[in-house]
Each structure stands twice: as C-alpha cells, then as structure tokens.
Amino acid sequence: MDQQTIFLTILGMMAVTYIPRALPVLALARRTLPEPVIRWLGFIPVAVLSAMLLPSLVAPEKILDFSFQNIFLWAALPTFLVCWKTRSFVGAVVTGMGCVALGRLFFT
C-alpha cells in the first residue's frame, strides 16, 4: 500500500471512532435527561462488561466448559463475591488474579 492510502485509512478510522462518541455528547450537552433514563444509562457499563466477560468465562477454548478444569469460571465466583461485597475494583482484580494463580498452581 502506498502512503496516501494508509494515511486516508487512518483518517477514516479516526472519523468512525470519534463521530459516534462526539454526537451524543454534542446533542445532549445542554439538555436535562429524565431520571429513569439516567438510571437506565447507569446499567450500560455493567451490561457491556458482562457481555464481553461471559464468553471468556464459560468458553475459554471456544467450547462451553463448565467443568472443574475451567479455572477462569471458578476464579470468577470469589471475584464476583469480593466485588459485590466491597465495591472495590482493585480488590476484585487482586482476588481474580490470585484465584487464577492458585488454580494454575494447584490444578494445572
């Protein structure tokens, strides 16, 4: 590919990344949203994270795996518990990493 094609491709990728993020901000900047909408929008990050995380937990090798050998699924259980009880991102990350490390040490 020549330099001009690469440059135009990068510019196009920048535009399709920036525009969907900027339009809602510009359209809603001076408006007050109703309380139910604000409450509903608060669930979007959790829903997106769950949708991205679930396939990695139940199908780490692209096949459904609910067995005891799936350490990611079993490590997620105490991690979710710590996250739910403490509301601590750092605590959840440390718990998840520790559980996976222990699972690999003892069960792999």
Image (cartoon, rainbow, N blue to C red):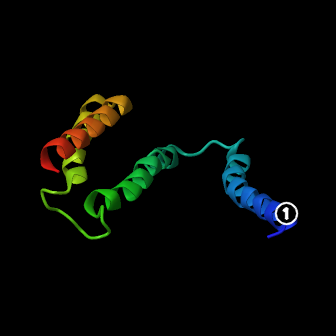
Question: Residue 68 placed where, x, y %?
Answer: 12, 56
Front one among 41 and 67: 67
Q: Is residue 37 left or right of residue 53?
A: right
Numbered disc 1: secondary structure: helix
Q: Is any part of residue 77 visible from this angle?
A: no
Instruction: Identify which residue is drawn at 14% across, 61% down.
Output: 67
Q: Is residue 96 left or right of residue 23?
A: left
Instruction: Identify which residue is drawn at 83% across, 68% down.
Output: 5
Q: Is residue 64 above or below residue 69?
A: below
Q: Is any part of residue 10 visible from this angle?
A: yes
**Badge 1: how crowded within 10 Å, few (<14), some, or many (20+)?**
few
Q: Is residue 73 left or right of residue 8?
A: left
Front one among 35 and 1: 1
Front one among 48 and 94: 94
Instruction: Identify which residue is drawn at 80% across, 58% down.
Output: 11
Quadrant in the rendering for residue 95: top left
Q: Is residue 5 above or below residue 105?
A: below
Instruction: Identify which residue is drawn at 39% across, 58% down.
Output: 51
Q: Is residue 108 above or below residue 67?
A: above
The amino acid at mark 1 is Gln
Residue corresponding to mark 1: 3
